[in-house]
Amino acid sequence: MKSLHAPAIMAIVAAVMCVSSSSAAEYALLVPDAGAARLIKVGDMLPKPPPDEPGTSRPELHGQALRNQAIGNLKKRFDAAADPSTHLLSLADAKAAGFGYVADHFKEIDRNGSGYISFADLVLYLKSRKGPAFNKDS
C-alpha cells in the first residue's frame, strides 16, 4: 500500500492552511512521480497516491516470512522487558513494560509456578493457544 510520508503530509497541510487567505491556484506541491517530479495544485484530484520514494518501501510479507517477523518482534519486546542477566520475565516486569497480554495470562504461561517465565515458556503457551504466528495454514 502506498502512503504519503510525513514531510509530504506536512507540506499539504501547510498549503491547505494558506488557501484560506488566498486562491488555491497559487499554491502547489512538488511530488515524485515515476522517477520525475510533478507539480500538483491544491484541489487537484489524484487517481492514486504518489509512489513511495525509491528504497523506502518494503515488500509485504506472507507465510513463514511473516511468522518469523512476528516472532522476532515478540522476542525483541520480551528481551527488552526481561531481566538482562537471567533473560526471565516476572509479572511486575511484564506490567511495567506494558506487556498486557503476558501480564493477563502470566499464571497460565508460568506452568511451574516459579514467578518467572522464559521466552520458551511464552512460545510454548502461544503454540498451545494456536496463536496466528504458529498456525501453519495461514
Image: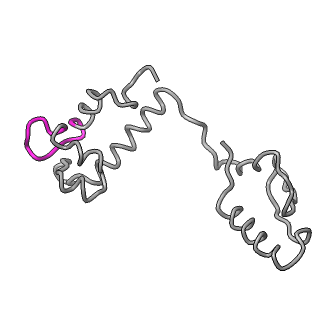
Q: Which quadrant would residue 60 be assigned to in this image?
A: top right
Magenta segment includes 44: no
Residue drawn at (71%, 51%), measured in percent from left and top?
53
> What segment carries the magenta color?
109-121
Query: Where 6 sits versus 103, above or below?
Result: below
Magenta segment includes 110: yes
Query: x, y percentage for residue 9?
Result: 69, 62
Classify residue 40 as left or right of residue 79. right
Most extreme residue toward the front is 20
* Front residue of 26 and 7: 26
Query: Where 92 sits versus 68, above or below?
Result: below
Residue drawn at (49%, 26%), measured in percent from left and top?
63
* Front residue of 97 and 64: 97
Classify residue 132 as left or right of residue 1. left
Query: x, y percentage for residue 1?
Result: 66, 42
Residue drawn at (39%, 24%), measured in percent from left and top?
135
Query: Where 48 sits versus 92, above or below?
Result: above
Most extreme residue toward the bottom is 21
* Front residue of 73 and 24: 24
> What colour scheme governs how the chains and residues are painted in the rendered image of this protein?
one colour
Labels in figure, total:
0
Most extreme residue toward the top is 137
Residue drawn at (24%, 46%), measured in percent from left and top?
104
Classify residue 25 as left or right of residue 104. right
Query: x, y percentage for residue 26?
Result: 90, 72
Query: x, y percentage for residue 18?
Result: 79, 76
